[in-house]
Amino acid sequence: MANHSFYAWTAHAQGTRNQPIQRHYWNPTDGREMQQFRQDQTGQDLKDFSQIQGESLGDRYATDILGYQVIMHGDNKSIAQGLDGLYWDDKRQELVVMEFKGQSSGYSSGQKRPDWSISTCQKIQDYQKPYHNVSEYERQFATEILQHYDRGEMIRYEAVRTDVDMKTGEWWSQLEKQQWMEQEFQDMEIKPEL
């Protein structure tokens, strides 16, 4: 497997949490029930609920609203870190690496980097912590993403957040970040070590 840090790459992005690319509002009755349930949660239970909310509704948003096909479902992850899902966008013929966020969860410093999806896959392939214990299922998809990248094909990273307005019970999922990454092939001289 190639060391992807040697490659020059380009990335471009759009969207923010405050200026999402697209927003979908869910059934308000369900939102009020979720709001009431969420108000009763504290500490780790609240954090777990937020993660479940983000991942389950994020997947529903990706498949039902955006029309993506599931390649790797996040429910099959063996550790909390890493890729939340892998999808195929038939309209654009692009591989989409997804990150799902619930309510007020933030991005890690790594997720803010444009090469996050590629560097995470490389860490999975290199058995680096915390990815050294991922399942073969996840390792297989990391390999597929890196091969996609090695062929010079575009990889898209998207972040979807699900929020509930705690005052009104209104709830939505929004595509708040879209980022494309591809290799720039260039002639490079790599000197062998003596």
Image (cartoon, grey):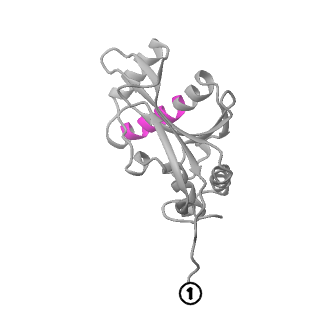
The quarter of the image holding the C terminus is bottom right
**Residue 19, relative to residue 183: is it above or below?**
above
Which corner quadrant of the image does residue 169 belong to?
top left
Taking the image as shown, residue 65 lies to the left or right of residue 42, namely right
| Amino acid on which the number 1 mark rests in the picture | Leu
Q: Is residue 46 above or below residue 5?
A: above
The answer to whether residue 19 is left or right of residue 78 is left
Residue 80 seen anywhere in this rendered image of the structure: no
- The residue nearer to you, when weighing 54 against 159, is 159
Please say whether residue 1 is visible from this viewpoint.
Answer: yes
Counting from the top left corner in percent of width and height, residue 32 is at 40, 16
Residue placed furthest toward the bottom: 194
Residue shown at the point (61%, 54%) measured from the top left: 185
- Residue 12 in the image: state x and y as whole percent: 48, 39
- Point out residue 128 in the picture as x, y percentages from the top left corner: 52, 65
Residue picked out by circle 1: 194
Q: Which residues are magenta?
A: 46-57
Q: Which residue corresponds to the image point at 54% horizontal and 46% vertical from the top-left?
A: 83
Residue 93 magenta: no
